[in-house]
Image: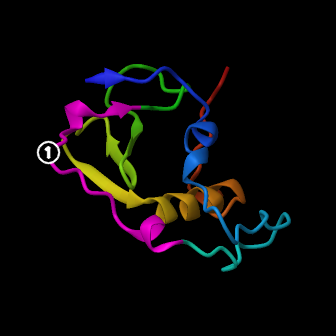
Amino acid sequence: MRSRAPLQISAWLASFRPRAGRAAPPEEGKMMSDEVVYTESQRRKPVLGSLTADDLNWQHPAESNGAGGMCVELAVVPGGVMLRDSANPETMLGFSQAEIDIFLRAVSVGEFDRFRVLADRA
C-alpha cells in the first residue's frame, strides 16, 4: 500500500469544488443551501476499472495515531474519491465529486458536530 504524505484534506480536494454556481458557506448556525449546481460529470460515481485498493494513493488524517486500524482514508480516483476504513482496507466506497463536496461542506459548517468524540488530550 502506498501512502501519501500528510496534507490538508481541504487543499488536497480543492480540485473537486464545483466550477460554477458555488455558494458561499452559510453563516454560523444556518444549514447549507441548495444553491450549488453540479455538472453531470461531477455527479457521476467514479469508476475504478482495473484499479485495486493497492493501486491508490491513500491519505489519512495527520492526527491519526499510527496504531493501525483506526483511520478513515481517502484516495482521489478519476471522477471522484474512494473512502475506506484502514481496518478493512479492501472494502472501498466510491463517491462522486459532488457527493464528497456536499459532505465536506456540511462538515465544515458543523452539521455533523454531534458525531464528534472529544479525546482526552492531556
**Count of marks placed on residues:** 1
Q: Secondary structure at mark 1?
A: loop
Front position in the image: 115 or 57: 57
The quarter of the picture where the N terminus appears is: top left
- In this rendering, the answer to whether 74 lies above or below 1 is below
Q: Picture quarter containing residue 87? A: top left
Residue pointed to by mark 1: 50
Q: Residues within 10 Å of mark 1 (few under 14, many from 20)?
A: few
Question: Is residue 43 shown in magenta?
Answer: yes
Q: Which residues are magenta?
A: 39-58
Question: Is residue 97 shown in magenta?
Answer: no
Front position in the image: 78 or 104: 78
Residue 118, how many percent across, how many down?
A: 62, 40
Which residue in the rendered view is the most extreme toward the bottom? Answer: 34
Residue ID at (57%, 64%) = 102
- In this rendering, the answer to whether 98 lies above or below 47 is below
Residue 58, how many percent across, how many down?
A: 37, 32
Residue 15, how many percent across, how many down?
A: 57, 47
Q: Is residue 30 left or right of residue 46?
A: right
- In this rendering, the answer to whether 81 lies above or below 32 is above
Q: Is residue 107 left or right of residue 42?
A: right
Q: Picture quarter containing residue 37? A: bottom right
Which residue in the rendered view is the most extreme toward the left? Answer: 50
Residue ID at (45%, 74%) = 40
Colour mapping: rainbow
Q: Is residue 2 left or right of residue 11?
A: left
Q: Amino acid at mark 1?
A: Ser
The quarter of the picture where the C terminus appears is: top right
Residue 112, how many percent across, how many down?
A: 60, 60
Residue ID at (53%, 23%) = 6
